Image (cartoon, rainbow, N blue to C red):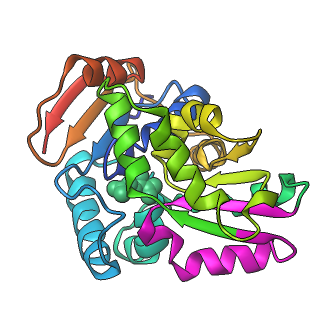
Amino acid sequence: MSDDRPILMFDSGVGGLSVLAPTRALLPQASYVYVADNGGFPYGIRSEAEIAARVPALLGRLVERYRPRLVVIACNTASTIALAAVRAALDLPIVGTVPAIKPAAERSGSRAIGVLGTDATVRQPYVDDLSARFASDCLVLRHGSARLVELAEAKLRGEAADPADYRAVLDGLLGQPGGDRIDTVVLACTHFPLVEAELSAAAPRPLGFVDGGPGIARRVAHLTDGQDWPAVPTGEAVFTAPLEIGNALRAGLAARGLDRISVL
Ligand code: DGL
């Protein structure tokens, strides 16, 4: 028996592709609907109230329309603010993306870790909780960067960037008191793993980068274990507002299995 229900992944933009890739590698038999809320982008500079109002309502619409078997909120900003509200409103499994502070603390030799996210994410009490629970013996420094989100979006559009831009972002983290001790950086925004190579090249010393993608992929595989799958898996990218889709973005989406593109 086949089951056509897709896995729905949601982000403000292309960031969630860093979660889609490891999930698709584990579950190539699944159909995926990848939703980029470009109509609400960027989330990281919005208020908690705006995100809390927008995300549950939009996901409600999306679930009605696409009838997924499971939803992944592939966005740290939306998850750290609205995960509980989305779970309360929707009657299906919701997997969130929260800063990978636990694996970073397990890995750090210097006991100093950096959390690079959006401005909205790094100020969330959720990050205080994760730090207290999993990294209480570590110095945890945070830095919010809207610029790095733009750089990741630009990269997927095929635009070249100046390495100095990446250095400036890292300076905001490593230049804080104690920042010279950081050996591990949490990429706490799903856009950031898309530019990990650029960050690594711009870093003044070798840093370990950690993100939640592989853990989320394992969680999705676990939650869907034993289910039936579509006879022919499909992949569709959905944008919430009209946009011009250039060749580079189209190719980037197709390379990730999203060969259909539509606007909500
Ligand atoms: N990709 C999102 C995150 O993980 C947010 C990017 C943005 O819209 O600011 O936080």
Q: Please tell me in which quadrant of the rendered image residue 156 appears.
A: top left
Query: Does the magenta run of residues contain 126?
Result: yes
Where 185 falls versus 27 (above or below)? below
Q: Is 55 included in the stretch rendered in magenta?
A: no
Q: Which quadrant holds the C terminus?
A: top left
**Residue pushed farthest left?**
242
Q: Specify whether 124 is left or right of 134.
A: left
**What residue is rendered at 36% in x and 22% in y?**
252
Asked whether 50 or 86 is in front, the reply is: 50
Q: Which residues are magenta?
A: 111-140
Relative to 39, 19 lies left or right? right
Q: Residue at x 38, y 35 (%)?
A: 32
Position of the N terminus, as image quadrant, is top left
Rendering quarter of residue 247: top left
Residue 176 x, y percent position in the rendering: 65, 67
Closest to the observer: 102 or 232? 102
Q: Give the answer, above or below, for where 264 lies relative to 87.
A: above
Quadrant containing ligand 1 reads: bottom left
Q: Position of residue 172 (x, y in %)?
A: 56, 60
In the image, is residue 41 above or below residue 81? above
Q: Estimate the x, y position of residue 181 in percent, counting from the top left.
A: 82, 59
Residue 47 placed where, x, y %?
A: 31, 77
Q: Residue at x 55, y 44 (%)?
A: 167
Residue at 66%, 80% (x, y): give it: 129
